[in-house]
């Protein structure tokens, strides 16, 4: 009886040893399949430390110098509309979507800046590292994210949808516009923010066509000294454009009340 108990204890111990050995061998594979410690604190810190970065001050200087930059804002669409860095593009963190956006004008030597709100530095840093590994040698992430940019009080462009944007709007009616045109047409620039097809069908004589979605990246086509008259497919679109121009320091931009139809009906 005693000998049987010893045999059982030995067998149980042997099985336990075998299980420990099997687990030791299988553990690395299990962790790899299950993600393991992929997002452990050590790996996250290593990813952030490895990633090339740019400060808000440096980015502001490079924008002021009119360098060609591809700024990818990884925040949600609502946050982006409430305020973003001029000429930045909104994108999810999906690499295929990002690749599609930058492939339209960037190459492997282009300066590409990734940013998010700032709380999750790891997201932007990891994407910067991923694109560096793909050969985009000048990919960086914005240190401190959008929060850092705001804290420095650097310019922010809004989508013209918040109540505070109303204070940025100025309007002009057709009577005042006709009076201004009689004084001097060369002192006025019309900006048509509709799509090119609508512009081709009809537009105000002398107007420059800059679709609303391209306004930030093409603001160089707009005069800094003339009175700017904006119209679009409707007044709401024109108001969004006017807010954008205000945020870009064009303080002489006016929304045409009644839009293009009002000027047509005036017979001018």
Image (spheres, grey):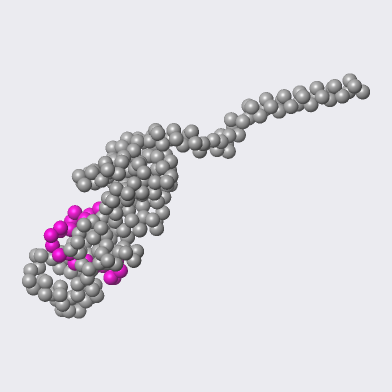
Q: Nearer the viewer, residue 86 or 232?
A: 86
Residue drawn at (29%, 67%) of the image: 166
Residue drawn at (22%, 68%) of the image: 170
Query: From this viewpoint, is residue 53 visible?
Result: yes
Q: Nearer the viewer, residue 201 or 61?
A: 61
Residue drawn at (32%, 49%) of the image: 151
Q: Is residue 21 left or right of residue 212?
A: right
> Residue 247: image x %, image y %?
25, 58
Please tell me in which quadrant of the rendered image residue 14 appears. Answer: top right
Q: Is residue 220 magenta?
A: yes
Please tell me in which quadrant of the rendered image residue 141 appears. Answer: top left
Residue interval drawn in magenta: 217-237
Query: From this viewpoint, is residue 130 visible?
Result: no
Q: Is residue 215 magenta?
A: no
> Residue 189: image x %, image y %?
15, 64
Residue 118 against residue 260 in the figure, above or below = above
Q: Is residue 168 left or right of residue 13?
A: left
| Quadrant assignment for the C terminus | bottom left
As drawn, the residue found furthest toward the top would be 3
Residue 96 against residue 163 in the figure, above or below = above
């Amino acid at each position: 009886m005693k000998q049987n108990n010893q045999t059982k204890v030995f067998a149980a111990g042997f099985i336990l040893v075998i299980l420990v050995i099997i687990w030791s061998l299988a553990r690395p594979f299990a962790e790899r399949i299950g993600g393991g410690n992929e997002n452990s604190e050590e790996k996250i810190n290593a990813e952030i430390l490895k990633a090339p970065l740019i400060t808000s001050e440096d980015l502001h200087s490079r924008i002021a110098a009119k360098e060609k930059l591809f700024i990818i804002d990884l925040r949600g669409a609502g946050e982006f509309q409430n305020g973003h860095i001029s000429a930045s593009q909104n994108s999810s963190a999906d690499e295929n979507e990002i690749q599609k956006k930058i492939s339209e004008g960037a190459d492997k030597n282009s300066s590409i800046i990734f940013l998010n709100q700032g709380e999750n530095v790891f997201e932007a840093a990891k994407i910067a590292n991923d694109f560096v590994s793909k050969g985009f040698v000048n990919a960086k992430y914005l240190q401190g994210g959008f929060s850092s940019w705001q804290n420095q009080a650097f310019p922010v462009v809004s989508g013209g949808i918040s109540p505070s944007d109303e204070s940025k709007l100025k309007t002009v009616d057709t009577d005042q516009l006709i009076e201004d045109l009689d004084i001097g047409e060369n002192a006025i620039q019309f900006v048509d923010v509709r799509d090119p097809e609508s512009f081709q069908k009809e537009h105000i004589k002398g107007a420059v066509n800059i679709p609303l979605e391209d306004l930030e990246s093409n603001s160089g086509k707009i005069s800094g000294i003339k009175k700017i008259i904006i119209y679009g497919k409707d007044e709401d679109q024109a108001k969004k454009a006017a807010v954008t121009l205000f945020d870009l320091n064009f303080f002489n931009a006016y929304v045409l009340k009644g839009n293009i139809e009002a000027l047509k009906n005036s017979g001018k």
